[in-house]
Amino acid sequence: MSGPTLGFPSLVLTVAAVVLGSLLVAAVLVTVGYSLLAARRHRRRESMRADLRSGLLDRLYGPEDPDWVSWVAGLSAASRDELESLLDVYLRQLEGSDAARLAELGVALGIPDRSRREIAEGDYWNRLHALTWLALLRDPPDRKLLEDHCTGTPRERAAAVRVLYMGDAPDLATTGVDLLLENDPSAFSVFGIDTLYRVGEADPSPLLTRAAAEFDEWDPALQQQVLSVTGHLHSVVGDADLSWVVEALSNPEERVRVAAWRALGAYGWNGSLRAGIDTTTITADPSPVVRASAYRLLGAWGDPDALDVLRSVAATEPDGRTRVVAAEALLASRPRASIASTGATDPPEGLEEAWAWAVEHVRFDERARDVSRGSPG
């Protein structure tokens, strides 16, 4: 009699187990090997980075000419790549003469020329990467290069103008506004809005002139952003045309009307502008949010004429919460200490309940401040 033999199913299971076991062992060996190789590369990179950092700082702060060109010429391709990474870090941290000296290292590495080629020949991400480098190096390219290749999206527009701003390019305001707002512009990100503000703060005239001519052609989101920037400008506006801001008080979009009232807060000194505002637009506006913005504006101006208008238009305010906003705007012109002590017991007509609530809010706020300062309640 012959001994027992494995059936076909058992044989298949045995072979499968052997194969799976072999694959598992191979996977473990590959994973361990890769981990060891990665750890080795990491140690080499850290050692290289430490040497490069030491060499960079010795040359940057040493008494002699750093001679970046000779140093870079003696480095391997891997070392140059690592040095670029270090340069990126330090350029984001340093200012003044240190940043200017580091910019020379960027030139020695060939970054400005490479970045200009990437703007002209690269794709979207290449262009953004190149613009970032030129901004860090404070090395603005020609306007034509930016106009030809960097106006396809709001992000590229903002990045291109930020390069001009960082490099203190000549005619920054005009060129910056043209790049940002020419040829059917779209709404910006927060970075883009900040860039538009920086350009406008340098010289508000180009921005205000373009807005006066093209505001109605923009989509509501961009209109809102430009109004917001206009309301935060601290540069001297002079006799710039701001009639478009007043006209925006009647815009069909609620958010644009709100932004227009807020923008006017910076121009209470402008008598001719104020004379062009029809206060009946406040009571006629169907949005309590817009009316509340108008009340805050009048309270922020705070002069007798503005407060008289505020008392007049708020007397017929139909919305309870908006009446509170009107009361708070009126109270904002009075010393908080006197409100907290006397209660400001002369409420305007039509605002009695809202006035009492606003006064109590001021009292509570003052008591909270006293507690935080350690004063007795």
Image: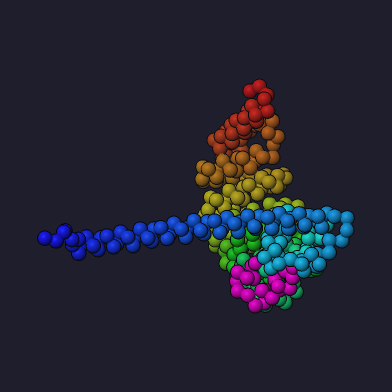
Observer able to see residue 260: no
Residue displayed at 20% across by 61% down = 6
The answer to whether residue 237 is magenta is no
Q: Give the range drawn in magenta.
A: 108-129
**24 sits to left or right of 4:** right
- Whole-percent x, y for residue 290 in the image: 57, 53
Relative depth, front residue between 147 and 256: 147
Residue 122 magenta: yes
The residue furthest top is: 376
Q: Is 320 rendered above or below residue 261?
A: above
In this view of the protein, can residue 145 be seen by the observer? yes
- Residue drawn 80% across and 67% down? 69
Quadrant for residue 113, please give it: bottom right
Residue at image position (68%, 46%) is 300
Judging depth in this view, the residue of 112 and 170 nearest the camera is 112
Residue extending furthest toward the right: 63
Q: Residue 168 at what x, y percent from top left?
A: 79, 64
**Quadrant of res 133:** bottom right
User: x and y percent of residue 198 in the render?
Assistant: 72, 59
Q: In which quarter of the image is the C terminus?
A: top right
Would you place residue 112 above or below residue 255 in this image?
below
Q: Residue at x 77, y 67 (%)?
A: 74
Q: Position of residue 211 (x, y in %)?
A: 68, 66
